[in-house]
Image (tube, grey):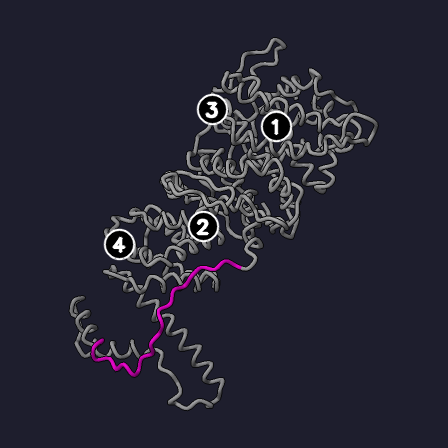
């Protein structure tokens, strides 16, 4: 691109890019690479500008696709980057800004080229482009067959081993983004990919030893929520050729130019994302979710999922079981705090679900916390604002509650936590209420919303299951929560009676009157006793009448139900739901990455 590049629109005419994608081979040792990598132009600030960058990249890419079999310039560019990464750690320690900046630019170009290559060719064709060298036209060397694997391993090493400093922040973000791009073949397939070249490289060979270290690093990036370096951190001296001040492209992160862009969801309403404070944490979380949801290899389980399922608390001194590979330790308190603070995003809620559902160490730790309100309140707020959330985010929040309510200790403790002034609950002023009563109110509100709006059977079932799990431990309910329970029961009873009446009528008298059950008998019994007691009854008097009625209630009219506990059970093929969901999050939320909606095959895109 060179030091004189200034606008995205100029890229197709840029002499350095023309040479890279042209018919002339460029040696790895050619000074051309230093010139190419000294580019400077404003970072894209919107989806429109990202689209312009994509279109500019496509024209260069197509020329490179045509000429690379003869020039091998793609492989040469990757080898230049690989050679530079060997000195990257030392350059960070020595504060060599320009070397790191140019290395970042090399990776940025590779990422842009790969994204277009992946969208326009098969993995087999892409792998072949990594093998071409500057010999005779179309020839390739068997010695370079693993260049793609070497690049993947290099990215993993860069993410895990390079210290996170102001001068390495952008290249760390770019390395994670490039790994996401490597795995983005899934976007261009309607079916879930179960065998993939990139999956194979990540699950075996030289990349495999990095598994636990990579997962741990990505989790810590999420936990720390490191903000980009301050503006001006990457201003370099003026060049003698008059090219002006050189800025790394990703220094736009430092000045707040990178933005999250939303281009639709998976056919449902996407929430407006909050201002992104940490691009590194955002990209790390997305890559972690992508890795966790890779399908198992034919001969081995997904090692990244194994790592997520088995990591332990740093305070846990018990030995690691030899039968569980890829495990590690992480600070659970820091992770819990980050999860509580970040629940406004789909991806953070999905991570919380993944950890609660798959990692028994995390689940046990969270259920033992004495400040569960810090975790539960953000989840309840998601459900409360159901109209503003997409359906998947609501499902994840609800399933998290269902998993928590499987534990009797949780169901007891939530009634002991007293909350003050819940400002986001607008139907009624709640100056003081227990966490348990608030949970009941929000779940019932979600049920009623579902009954009148979406009519989703899955949502309905899980809401009722959560209420049923909690019911045996109801204690000291807020009067408004008790009122809403009675109203819900009355509504459901009426619906049940109506269905029962329709079913009875359809039998045309085949049932005798003695065979027809009285589903509302309990309600009728207590209502009559309250009516006999007169009007203007106090709460205490109502409670006293009900207690007396319980003793006098004819037991022969009641049916005894066994105590039930509803447990969340994942679908038989969860990847059919989770993989499209994860990639919709990547598509909507990844920083600095744009895909043409018309090319997406995995899920249906809303028109923008």
Query: Which residue carries the number 1 mark?
Result: 107
Query: Which residue carries the number 2 mark?
Result: 353
Q: Which mark is residue 358?
A: none
Query: Which residue carries the number 3 mark?
Result: 165
For the residue pair 505 and 308, the one nearer the viewer reads as 308
Mark 1 / mark 2, whichever is N-terminal: 1
Q: Residue at x 62, y 19 (%)?
A: 38
| Residue 255, x across and y down, in percent | 48, 25
- Whole-number angstrom distance, CA of label 4 to CA of label 3: 44 Å
Q: Is residue 157 above or below residue 409?
A: above
* Label 1 close to label 2 by CB (< 8 Å): no
- Whole-number angstrom distance, CA of label 3 to CA of label 1: 18 Å
| Residue 565, x across and y down, in percent | 38, 64
Query: Which residue carries the number 4 mark?
Result: 434
Q: Residue at x 66, y 20 (%)?
A: 36
Q: Secondary structure at mark 2?
A: helix
| Residue 519, x across and y down, in percent | 36, 78
Is 15 contained in the magenta span? no
| Quarter of image, res 119 | top right
Q: Secondary structure at mark 3?
A: loop
Q: Secondary structure at mark 1?
A: helix
| Stretch of the chain drawn in magenta | 550-571
Q: Residues within 10 Å of mark 1 (few under 14, many from 20)?
A: many
């Amino acid at each position: 691109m060179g030091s004189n590049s200034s606008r995205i629109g100029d890229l197709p005419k840029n002499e350095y890019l023309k040479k890279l994608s042209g018919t002339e081979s460029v040696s790895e040792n050619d000074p051309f690479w230093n010139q190419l990598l000294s580019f400077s132009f404003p970072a894209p600030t919107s989806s429109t500008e990202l689209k312009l960058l994509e279109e500019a990249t496509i024209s260069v890419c197509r020329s490179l696709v045509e000429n690379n079999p003869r020039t091998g310039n793609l492989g040469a560019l990757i080898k230049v980057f690989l050679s530079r990464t060997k000195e990257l750690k030392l350059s960070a320690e020595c504060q060599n800004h320009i070397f790191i900046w140019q290395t970042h630019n090399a990776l940025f170009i590779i990422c842009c080229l790969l994204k277009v290559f992946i969208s326009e060719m098969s993995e087999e064709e892409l792998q072949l482009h990594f093998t071409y060298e500057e010999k005779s036209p179309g020839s390739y060397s068997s010695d370079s067959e693993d260049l793609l694997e070497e690049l993947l391993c290099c990215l993993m090493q860069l993410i895990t081993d390079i210290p996170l400093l102001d001068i390495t922040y952008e290249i760390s973000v770019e390395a994670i983004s490039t790994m996401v791009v490597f795995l983005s073949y899934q976007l261009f397939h309607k079916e879930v990919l179960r065998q993939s070249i990139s999956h194979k490289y990540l699950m075996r060979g030289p990349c495999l030893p990095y598994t636990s270290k990579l997962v741990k690093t990505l989790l810590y990036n999420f936990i720390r929520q490191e903000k980009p370096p301050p503006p001006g951190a990457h201003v370099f001296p003026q060049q003698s050729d008059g090219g002006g001040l050189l800025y790394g492209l990703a220094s736009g992160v430092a000045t707040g130019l990178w933005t999250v862009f939303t281009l639709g969801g998976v056919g449902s309403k996407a929430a407006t994302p909050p201002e992104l404070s940490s691009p590194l944490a955002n990209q790390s979380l997305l890559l972690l979710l992508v890795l966790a949801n890779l399908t198992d290899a034919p001969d081995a389980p997904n090692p990244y999922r194994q790592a997520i399922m088995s990591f332990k608390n740093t305070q846990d001194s018990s030995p690691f079981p030899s039968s569980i590979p890829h495990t590690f330790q992480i600070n659970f308190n820091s992770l819990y705090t980050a999860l509580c603070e970040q629940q406004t995003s789909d991806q953070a809620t999905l991570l919380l679900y993944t950890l609660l559902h798959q990692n028994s160490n995390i689940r046990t730790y969270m259920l033992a916390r004495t400040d569960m309100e810090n975790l539960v309140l953000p989840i309840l707020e998601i459900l409360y604002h159901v109209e503003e959330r997409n359906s998947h985010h609501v499902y994840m929040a609800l399933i998290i509650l269902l998993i928590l309510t499987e534990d009797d200790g949780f169901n007891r403790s939530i009634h002991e936590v007293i909350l003050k002034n819940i400002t986001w609950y607008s139907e009624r002023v709640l100056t003081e209420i227990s966490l348990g009563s608030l949970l009941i109110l929000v779940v019932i509100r979600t049920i009623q919303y579902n009954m009148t709006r979406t009519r989703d059977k899955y949502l309905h079932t899980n809401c009722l299951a959560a209420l049923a799990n909690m019911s045996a431990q109801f204690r000291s309910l807020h009067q408004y929560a008790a009122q809403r329970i009675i109203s819900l029961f009355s509504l459901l009873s009426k619906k049940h009676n109506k269905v029962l009446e329709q079913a009875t009528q359809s039998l045309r008298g085949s049932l005798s009157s003695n065979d027809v059950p009285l589903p509302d008998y309990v309600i009728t019994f207590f209502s009559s006793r309250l009516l006999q007691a007169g009007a203007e009854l106090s709460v205490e008097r109502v409670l006293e009448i009900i207690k007396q009625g319980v003793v006098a209630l004819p037991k022969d009219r009641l049916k005894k139900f066994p105590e039930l506990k509803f447990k969340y059970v994942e679908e038989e093929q969860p990847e059919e739901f989770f993989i499209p969901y994860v990639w919709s999050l990547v598509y909507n939320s990844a920083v600095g990455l744009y895909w043409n909606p018309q090319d997406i095959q995995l899920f249906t895109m809303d028109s923008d």
